[in-house]
Structure formats: C-alpha cells, structure tokens
Image (spheres, rainbow, N blue to C red):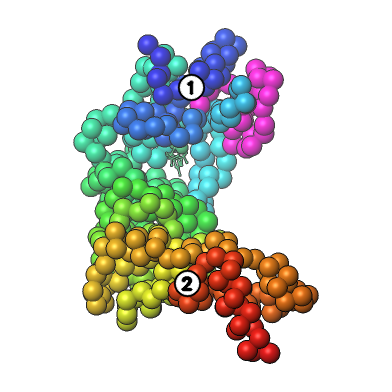
C-alpha cells in the first residue's frame, strides 16, 4: 500500500532520506486532509535527519528556516518542506518558542503539534501513525489539543485562533477542555501579529461554516481581544458560506457598521481588498434606500451586487428583494459592461475632430459611455459619431 495522497515526488523524497539511513514521514495538514478524504494542500515531511544532513541528500534545496529545522527540497521541480524532528523550548512571548531543539524521536515531534488531528503522521507506504487518538477525534468531529490544552495555548496563543478557524474549515466542534482553555486564555490573542490573525481569518472565511467559527469566537471571548470585531454577526447566517475571503470581510464590515478604512486598518488589508470593501460600502448605501439604478449595475461588479443584495436583506433594510437571476440578467443586459466594450476609442474622437488628444478625450469617452449605457445612442461607430459630433459642436 502507498500513501495515496502523496505524489510520486514526495514519496521519492522520503525514499531517499530512508536510503541514507534516516526516518522520514508525512505530517501535518496533508495527512489530516487525506484521512478526511479532502484534497491535500502543501505536503510536509518530518525527518530524523539534521538540516545539514537533509541538504547533503538532495542536489536541489533552499534554506527557508534552517534554524527551525526546515529545508525546502525540490524534487522534479516540486517543492517540499522537510523539517527535522524537533521540540520547542519555553515560550516567553506567547507566540514563538525561545529555542527549538532537534530530537531523534517522531513522538517528541508530534507532541509539539497543536491538535490531535494535526499530530498524525503517515509512512510512505500509507501506514498511519496516530499516537494521540487523532483519528477517533476526527471521526467524532472534535478538535482537541495535544496534551494539556491550557499549557499549549499559554505557549502559543495563535493555536486558539487556529482551533476556531478549523471549526469553520472542517465544521468540527471544539472539545470541552480545549474550549475552556481558550476562554481562559482569550486575552493572550493580543500577542499575535495582525498578519497572522488576518491569514487565519481568510481561511476561516473560506471555510464551510464561518457562522460556527464566529459563535466560538464570541463564546470564548476571543472577540473582545481581536483588533476589530462586530458585536453581532447575524448577517453571516444569510450570506455565508462565501466564494472568497473578501466577501467575508465585507460581511464583517457591514455587520459591525464599520467603514472600509476601519477594517483595512485593523487587519492590514491590501489595497485591492480595501477597494472591494469600498465598492460594497457604496453599493450598500445606495441599495439601502432604493433599487439599483442603471449606473449602479454598470459601476459595481456582479459579485458585489449579489452580495450587497443579501446584506441589505439580512440587515432588514430591504424595500423589495431581487433574486440572483434578476440581478444577473439586469447586469448582463446592459448595452456595455465596461468602457472596453465601447464601439469607439479616444483615437476615433481625434480623427473626427482633427484635434490633439488631451483631458477632453477621456471626459468625452465618459460622456459617450453614459449615453450608450442609457440608450441615448446605440453602441456602433456611426451612431456614436453622429451623437458625439452634435453634442461636441453644441458645447463649443
Ligand atoms: P492548512 O491546511 O491550512 O495548511 P495545517 O494544519 O497544515 O493547515 P500549517 O500551518 O501548514 O497548517 O502547519 C502544518 C502543521 O504544523 C500543522 O498541521 C501542525 O501539526 C503544525 N503546526 C502549525 N502551526 C502550529 C502551531 N501554532 N502550534 C503547534 N503546531 C503547529
Ligand atoms: Mg498545511
């Protein structure tokens, strides 16, 4: 039998380490997801070989964290993180071990991992190594800390947020003792960097059950120690699951009556993410008081229009709810979807007028766009030319 989830190249990495006299196994999320029948993401390998020894076995490696024991091995062009078995020393800052020690036993390595489902290992032959009852917890759909939960969260506060994130991604519950420990240590989440919280939130929003995760965040009181969190998340019931993480962020913004700037600042969102939130914010303000206009259908992307419709409805501000089909067909039946669909370009304006390009060109393309959008002139060069020259000469 072979570990079916693993690619040929990943098994080759293990085979070569074994051939050199070391132990090596698959570990972490890939094993968990395989047992759950989900597609594997990144494949991590743990080994008894020291980082220098790993580097000596493979012709192509990249140092990505040798001090923590991790070497990136490139096998047939595929990258694999190979990490030396290790334990972690004391944690004085609630987020990183003061030092890591390389060890020779897999058991010690698995002991440092956060949850029983994440402390599984698998040999290249596909034999599961389950020292802490991970399989049973998974079959009961339970997230349980490895060892004493309180100590584990005291060491690294991010683990509390990982637990919550997994409730959304997997739809699992948190085991009682583990949950109580989260409640007791909730305020230590403040030691975790915003970037790491943001990355977990993104995964949470992409999960199948964000509502569940948000309930845990509230009940455990993690909510009051996060950079920004709405007091109520009712809108999530009607808007999740989400296609993308940014839709989740938009819901968080609307649920808490926050501005795009509030959310972007608190969680260091990218400019692209912030501009999506700005779109939602504007569309929400408009749709809260009236039906979408032609200009709204043109200005906002379909995803924003659909999400905002649900949000406005969830917030109880809806005058008349539109279906997905109605919104989609209204958007699709616009004469043009963007300026790129116009039958003319700025160049045509120059030809027709004999003038040089300038600020006026862009302004007139804007006016033509509106005229076409509102059916004042048809989207073909002749009609546009006729309409344009008439309007242009009137203004001069
Ligand atoms: P994902 O599917 O999102 O990648 P993952 O569990 O694989 O989830 P990774 O960050 O890839 O998450 O970590 C790989 C493994 O490393 C985990 O499965 C777990 O065994 C261990 N691990 C990661 N973060 C921690 C942590 N903060 N504390 C203890 N163990 C951790
Ligand atoms: Mg992973």
Residue drawn where x is 39% and y is 45% of the image: 152
Residue 329 pos. (x, y %): 34, 61
> Any mark on residue 7, and which?
1
Residue at image mark 2: 373
Q: Quadrant of ligand 1?
A: top left
Separation of disc 2 and disc 1 at Cα? 52 Å
Residue 251 pos. (x, y %): 36, 65
Q: Which residues are magenta?
A: 45-74
Residue 279 drawn above or below residue 389? above
Q: Quadrant of the C terminus?
A: bottom right
Nearest to the observer: residue 159 or residue 249: 249
Nearest to the observer: residue 255 or residue 17: 255
Residue 269 pos. (x, y %): 52, 62
Q: Quadrant of residue 124?
A: top left
Any part of residue 37 in sight: yes
Residue 65 in the magenta stretch? The answer is yes
Tag 1 or tag 2, which sits nearer the N-term? 1
Q: How many marks?
A: 2
Q: Quadrant of the N terminus?
A: top left
396 lies left or right of 304: right
Secondary element type, mark 2? helix
């Amino acid at each position: 039998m072979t570990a079916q989830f693993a690619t040929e190249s990943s098994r080759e990495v293990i085979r070569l380490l074994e051939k050199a006299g070391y132990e090596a196994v698959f570990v972490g999320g890939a094993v968990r997801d395989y047992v759950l029948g989900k597609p594997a993401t990144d494949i991590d390998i743990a080994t008894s070989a020291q980082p220098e020894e790993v580097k000596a076995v493979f012709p192509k490696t990249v140092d990505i964290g040798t001090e923590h024991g991790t070497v990136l091995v490139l096998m047939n062009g595929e990258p694999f993180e190979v990490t030396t078995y290790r334990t972690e020393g004391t944690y004085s800052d609630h987020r990183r071990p003061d030092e890591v020690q390389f060890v020779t036993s897999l058991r010690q390595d698995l002991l440092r991992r956060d949850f029983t489902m994440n402390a599984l290992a698998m040999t290249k032959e596909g034999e599961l190594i389950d020292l802490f009852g991970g399989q049973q917890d998974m079959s009961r759909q339970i997230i349980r800390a490895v060892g004493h939960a309180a100590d584990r969260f005291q060491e690294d506060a991010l683990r509390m947020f990982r637990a919550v994130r997994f409730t959304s991604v997997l739809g699992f519950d948190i085991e009682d003792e583990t949950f109580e420990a989260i409640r007791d240590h909730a305020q230590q989440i403040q030691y975790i960097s915003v970037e790491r919280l943001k990355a977990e939130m993104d995964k949470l929003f992409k999960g199948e059950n964000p509502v569940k995760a948000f309930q845990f965040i509230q009940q455990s009181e993690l909510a009051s120690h996060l950079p920004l969190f709405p007091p109520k998340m009712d809108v999530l019931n009607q808007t999740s699951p989400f296609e993308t993480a940014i839709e989740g962020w938009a819901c968080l913004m609307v649920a808490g009556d926050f501005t795009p700037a509030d959310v972007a600042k608190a969680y260091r969102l990218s400019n692209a993410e912030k501009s999506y939130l700005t779109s939602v914010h504007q569309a929400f303000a408009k749709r809260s008081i009236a039906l979408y206009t032609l200009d709204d259908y043109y200005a906002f992307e379909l995803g924003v229009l659909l999400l905002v419709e649900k949000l406005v409805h969830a917030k109880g501000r809806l005058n008349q709810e539109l279906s997905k089909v109605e919104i989609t067909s209204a958007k699709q039946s616009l004469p043009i979807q963007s300026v790129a669909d116009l039958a003319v370009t700025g160049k045509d304006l120059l030809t027709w007028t004999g003038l040089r390009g300038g600020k006026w060109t862009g302004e007139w393309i804007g006016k033509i766009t509106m005229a076409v959008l509102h059916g004042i002139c048809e989207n073909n060069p002749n009609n546009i030319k006729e309409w344009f020259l008439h309007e242009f000469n009137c203004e001069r």
